[in-house]
C-alpha cells in the first residue's frame, strides 16, 4: 500500500471522507465479474458489486481514518447535462444485467452500515461531492475517494483526492500542491483545460484538433477560455481556426465539464459522523447475503456486542 499521510491540521479539525458510491460499485463489479465471481444470495441475486463496494469503503475508512464520512450516489442516467447536450454520455453502454439490482442494494448497504448517503435526481454524484466540498471545506479537511478525474477541479489546500489504483488499498493521491506542480495552474482551471480537450468517456469533443499539450499552453498563457477568446487574434492561425470552427462546442464543453458546487445539501456535519459497528451490523449484513463484507468489517474494525433487541426487523 502507498504511504498515505493524514491531513496536516489542528487536532480538533474534522476530517470528512467522501465516497463516490457508483465509482466503487462499478469497479467492484468488473473486478470480480471478469472471473465469473458474481456471489449470489440464496435467491440467486448477484452481490459482487455491493460486497466489493462495502469492502472498498471500509478499507478507505481504515486507511484515511476520518471523523466523518458520506457516500454520494448517481440517481439515474439522465441529468441536467443531457438537457444541455443530447450526446452527453450517450456512448456509454447499458450496465450488465447482473449489475441492475445492485444499484439499490448498494444504497441500502450504506444505510445498514450507518453511512450517510446523498443523491439527487437530475444531478451527478460529482455535483453532490462538489457541493459538500464547497459547504464544508472551511470547517473540515476532506478526502474524496473516486476514479473520476473531473474531481481534480475541487482540489484546494484542505481537499485531496484518492484515485483508486489497485485493489482496495492502493491509491493515487492528488493534493493541491501536486496538481500545481504537474499542471502549473490552479485546479479550478482544469475545467478550462477540458473545454478544449473534451472528454471521450462523457461524449463531448471539446475543440477537435486541440490536445492536452496545446490546451495546457493556452491555459498557462491566457488563464481561462474567456482569456483565450479575448486574445484570439494573437493566437497561431492554425489554433485560431480550430477554435473559430468549434466555438459553440468549446463554450458548451466548458459548461458540461464544470461541477455544480451549489446543490442544496440538507443536514449538518455531525450527521456524517463515522458510525460504530456492532454485532447487529454484522448480522444485518449476513442477513442480506453479504457474508464476505461482514468478515471484512470484523477484520478491520472493533465490533461492539449485540443490542438486546434486533433493530432490523
Image (tube, grey):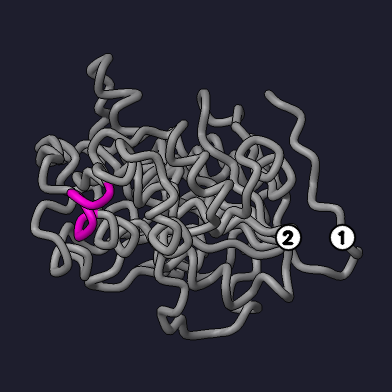
Say if 45 sits above or below 223 in the image: above
Question: Residue 200: percent from the left, percent from the top?
Answer: 24, 37
Task: In the displayed orientation, state which residue is furthest to the right.
Answer: 11
Report which residue position mark 2 lands on: 158
Instruction: Please state the total of marks drawn on the protein image.
Output: 2
Image point (41%, 36%), residue name = 52
User: Mark 1 or mark 2, which is nearer to you?
Assistant: 2
Residue 72 appears in the picture as rendered = yes
Question: Residue 106: percent from the left, percent from the top?
Answer: 33, 52
Say if 189 sits above or below 174 in the image: below
Report which residue position mark 1 lands on: 9
Residue 186 located left or right of residue 8: left
Question: Residue 194: percent from the left, percent from the top?
Answer: 39, 48
In the rendered image, residue 109 lying in the magenta stretch gets the answer: no
Q: 254 and 100: which one is in front?
A: 254
* Image quadrant assignment for residue 123: bottom left
Q: Write the start and end of the magenta stretch as one range.
A: 243-249
Residue 4 located left or right of residue 74: right
Say if 190 sits above or below 53 in the image: below
Image point (42%, 54%), residue name = 284
Q: Mark 1 vs mark 2: which is more N-terminal?
A: 1
Q: Residues within 10 Å of mark 2 (few under 14, many from 20)?
A: some
Q: Which quarter of the figure is the C terminus placed in?
A: bottom left
Q: How crowded is mark 1: few (under 14 residues within 10 Å), some or many (20 or more)?
A: few
Secondary structure found at label 2: loop
Q: Which quarter of the figure is the N terminus placed in?
A: top right
Secondary structure found at label 1: loop
Asked if the residue under mark 2 is in contact with the one under mark 1, i.e. CB atoms within 8 Å, the reply is yes
Amino acid at each position: 500500500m502507498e504511504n498515505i499521510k493524514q491531513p496536516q491540521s489542528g487536532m480538533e479539525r474534522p476530517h470528512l471522507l467522501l465516497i463516490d458510491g457508483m465509482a466503487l460499485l462499478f469497479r467492484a463489479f468488473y473486478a470480480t465479474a471478469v472471473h465469473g465471481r458474481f456471489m449470489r444470495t440464496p435467491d440467486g441475486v448477484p452481490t459482487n458489486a455491493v460486497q466489493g463496494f462495502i469492502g472498498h469503503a471500509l478499507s478507505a475508512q481504515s486507511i484515511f481514518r476520518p471523523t466523518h464520512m458520506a457516500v454520494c450516489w448517481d440517481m439515474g442516467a439522465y441529468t441536467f447535462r443531457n438537457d444541455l447536450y443530447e450526446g452527453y454520455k450517450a456512448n456509454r453502454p447499458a450496465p450488465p444485467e447482473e449489475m441492475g439490482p445492485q444499484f439499490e442494494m448498494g444504497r441500502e448497504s450504506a444505510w445498514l452500515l450507518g453511512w450517510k448517503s446523498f443523491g439527487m435526481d437530475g444531478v451527478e454524484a460529482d455535483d453532490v461531492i462538489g457541493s459538500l466540498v464547497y459547504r464544508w471545506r472551511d470547517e473540515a479537511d476532506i478526502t474524496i475517494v473516486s476514479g473520476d478525474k473531473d474531481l481534480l477541479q475541487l482540489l484546494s489546500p484542505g481537499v485531496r483526492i484518492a484515485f483508486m489504483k489497485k485493489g482496495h488499498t492502493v491509491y493515487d493521491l492528488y493534493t493541491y500542491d501536486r496538481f500545481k506542480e504537474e499542471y502549473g495552474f490552479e485546479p479550478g482551471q482544469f475545467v478550462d483545460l477540458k473545454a478544449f480537450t473534451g472528454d471521450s468517456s462523457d461524449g463531448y469533443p471539446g475543440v477537435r484538433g486541440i490536445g492536452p499539450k496545446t490546451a495546457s499552453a493556452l491555459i498557462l498563457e491566457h488563464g481561462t477560455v474567456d482569456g483565450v477568446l479575448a486574445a484570439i487574434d494573437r493566437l497561431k492561425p492554425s489554433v485560431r481556426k480550430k477554435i473559430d470552427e468549434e466555438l459553440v462546442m468549446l463554450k458548451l464543453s466548458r459548461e458540461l465539464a464544470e461541477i455544480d458546487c451549489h446543490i442544496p445539501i440538507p443536514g449538518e456535519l455531525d450527521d456524517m459522523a463515522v458510525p460504530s459497528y456492532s454485532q447487529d451490523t454484522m448480522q444485518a449484513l449476513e442477513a442480506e447475503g453479504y457474508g464476505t463484507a461482514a468478515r471484512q468489517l470484523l477484520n478491520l474494525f472493533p465490533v461492539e456486542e449485540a443490542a438486546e433487541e434486533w433493530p432490523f426487523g
